[in-house]
Image (spheres, helix red, strand yellow):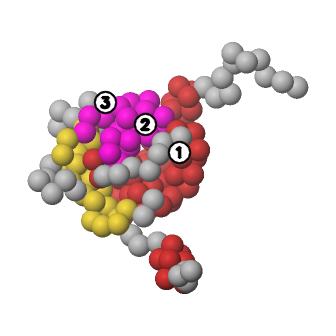
Amino acid sequence: MSRPANRRPENHKISRELLVLTYGALVAQLCKDYEKDEDVNKYLDSMGHNIGIRLVEDFLARSAVKKCQSYSETTEIIAQVAFKMYLGVTPSVTCNSAMGNEFSLILGKNPLADFVEELPAGRSSLCYCSLLCGAIRGALEMIHLAAEVTFIQDTLKGDDVTEIGITFLKKIEDKKHKRNKSNQHPK
């Protein structure tokens, strides 16, 4: 059976809303399971890291982006393509260092917090959207870039915007590629 050409295979708005609602339920359950906010934050970051690792292949296949030549280009692709593709928002990007390895993604609206008005009582250290930091970090690792990804500002903590900081640490050597280069014999 064929699908009509004008019909989209997925309704991304419904998928996003389902993700946001499911995510809220997940965070609520984690808050019940763990006493310390730090434990919840670590769990969410780890879960996001695993998602990021798996999402890269889908992203590269669906977006057809070429290899980035700089950290700034990589950050722009994350903001303009990846966030738009998976969350329906496009954060603005600012460079925070003269070395060109520190950037901020600034979201006027955080889709993961759409249905959340405030953090649960007694959970002031909770980083509700740690999943995003982990996903970015995991995806970057898969393209051989080590990075530190943290929340700098959060609207759920009273800030005007949500700001995610990305500090690129180094390019991770691809041992397979390096080994193949050294095994090549001159002709």
Looking at the figure, which quarter contains the C terminus? bottom right
Q: Is residue 128 above or below residue 171?
A: above
Q: Is residue 40 above or below residue 106?
A: below
Q: What stretch is highlighted in magenta?
A: 73-93
Q: How many marks?
A: 3
As drawn, is 76 to the left or to the right of 32?
A: left
Question: For the residue carrying disc 1, how many other residues have a C-alpha within 10 Å: few (<14), some (14-19), or many (20+)?
Answer: some
Q: Name the residue under label 1.
A: 59
- Residues at discs 3 and 1 in contact (Cβ within 8 Å): no
- Residues at discs 2 and 1 in contact (Cβ within 8 Å): yes
Question: Residue 135's spot in the image, x, y percent?
Answer: 43, 53
Question: Residue 141's spot in the image, x, y percent?
Answer: 43, 62
* Local SS, label 3: loop
Q: Name the residue under label 3.
A: 109
Q: Can residue 16 be seen in this snapshot? A: yes
* Local SS, label 1: helix
Q: Which amino acid does label 1 sit on?
A: Phe
Q: Distance between the residues labelled 3 and 2?
A: 16 Å
